[in-house]
Amino acid sequence: MIRLPRAPADLGLVLLVLAMLPAIACAQGASQAEVRRADMQADPAREAVTKPKAARASEVHRKSVARPASPAPTGTSPGSTSSPGPTQSSSTVGLSWGAVSGTTYYGLAVRDMTTNALVVDTTTTGTSYTASLTAGGQYRWNVAACNATGCWSYTIPLYFQTPTPTVATPATPTAAPLLAGDLAKCTAAELDALIAEQRKVIKTAPRDETARRNLGLISVEAANRILQAQSMGRAQEVSAYTALVRTSLADTLWRVTQFSREDRVRAQAALGLYHADGILVPMDPVRGCDYFAKAAAAGQLAAAYRASQCLSKLEPERAQRWLEQSAVGGNPAAQETMGRACIEGASIDAACAKKWLQPAAAQGRVSAMSVLAWLYARDGTTESLSKASNLYRTAAEAGDFAAQNNLGELFETGRGVSREPASALGWYRKSAESGFAPAQFNLARLLAFGIGTERDTAAAREWATRAQGQGIAQAAELLKLISDAEKPR
């Protein structure tokens, strides 16, 4: 039998207390919650740490709903409430708004309306922000005031556009007038660059008169440089400027002809060259000579020399006047021609020849140096032979065939220099390979007799045959000697 515990005497009192326990517990719990809430309000950071994540999210939501309304920033700029909005001055846009009391920072958003992408999503403590955006775009932006508890409502979105990039149209090139005096100071490379500049202008403006006139002036300058180079005997320079005219100034003949009525001296000399040498037109010596004579009458020395050459058979007296005028004026080609005339007649007038050849050689005309050296070598004195060897060497190193051969003769004989058969052989060979017949004979002679080198009758026969083919009579005798020496004894 189960015996029940004995009920206390004060059972009624116990039951009463048990009935009251839930109410007491509830009262104590409410008191603890109020204390916790007050504590968390005093220290929000503590609330974030002590509450579970779900509870914190719920509380934040409860607080954002319960927070009293705060005004959104005012004075937002730029933009308008309707799309697409005003176009800004650049793609770097300054966004600004008015300050809101109690705010510690602002949340900012800019959306690209074309791609719908949020291109700016940031915060700032100031009341302005500079956004670097894409040119030619459409955008929308707004801002909200925020503090430690979160952000209030964003402002009404404003729309704006960034300007479309413009491609600058290159300025149409124009030509500045050139002056003949300035062109005379230009190097060959600078003239070439000037031609390119004029061609660039004409490509965009085919009727640009200034550019076409400039090309005509450059053509005249190039032609006169050719004439001067011819006077100096500078074959490479003549070739270079001739190629420049033919390739880059082929359309300038008409313009140069027009200039001949204005700048008679230089333009007429240029026309004389073009017609006489067939540079821009078919060769016409008669017309070229006529232009040279006109330029010579106006004092152009190179043209006077060319006129003397083309008139030498038809009008010898007139030609001689042009030659003397040019030589006296200092044209080195005319001076050499006058000097050669003094030694190519029935008798040799060395003083007359030296009078004209010395100034021509001093100006650098290589062929004049060679002839002057021959005159000094002919004198035979120690001093004159020294002058001859120096002039021969300068001319030989510059490529004069006769000077190379004659310098070889000095080294072979030891006149004016130390006797060096090997050096003689070298200079003979250099001249012979250039086609100079006397040097071909001299080279064959040294090879045949083994002077300055090992004897080589086969090579000697080859060079002697070449010399004979160019009219060297002694070559036939040398060939006979070579054949006799090769016969068995």
Image (spheres, rainbow, N blue to C red):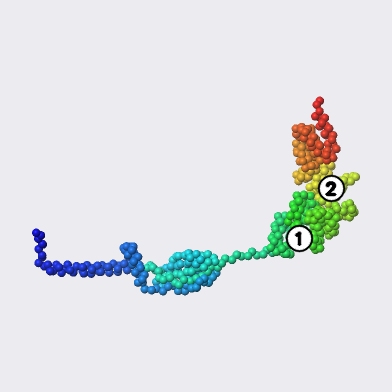
Number of the label disc, if any, that sits on residue 354: 2
Closest to the observer: 350 or 448? 448
Image location (x, y in percent) of residue 138: 52, 68
Q: Please say if 140 is above or below 451.
A: below
Under mark 2, the amino acid is Lys
Instruction: Assess disc 1: are there few (<14), some (14-19) or many (≥20) residues with their C-alpha within 10 Å of its C-alpha.
Output: many
Q: Quadrant of the C terminus?
A: top right
Closest to the observer: 184 or 129? 129
Name the residue located 76 percent from the left edge and 34 percent from the top edge.
Answer: 452
Q: CA distance from mark 2 to mark 1?
A: 41 Å
Closest to the observer: 225 or 466? 466
Q: Earlier in the sequence, mark 2 or mark 1?
A: 1
Horizontal side of residue 337 vs 239, given as left or right: right
Name the residue located 46 percent from the left edge and 67 percent from the top edge.
Answer: 109
Q: Is residue 324 visible?
A: no
**Residue on which disc 1 sits:** 216
Q: Secondary structure at mark 1?
A: helix
Return the residue found at the far top. 489
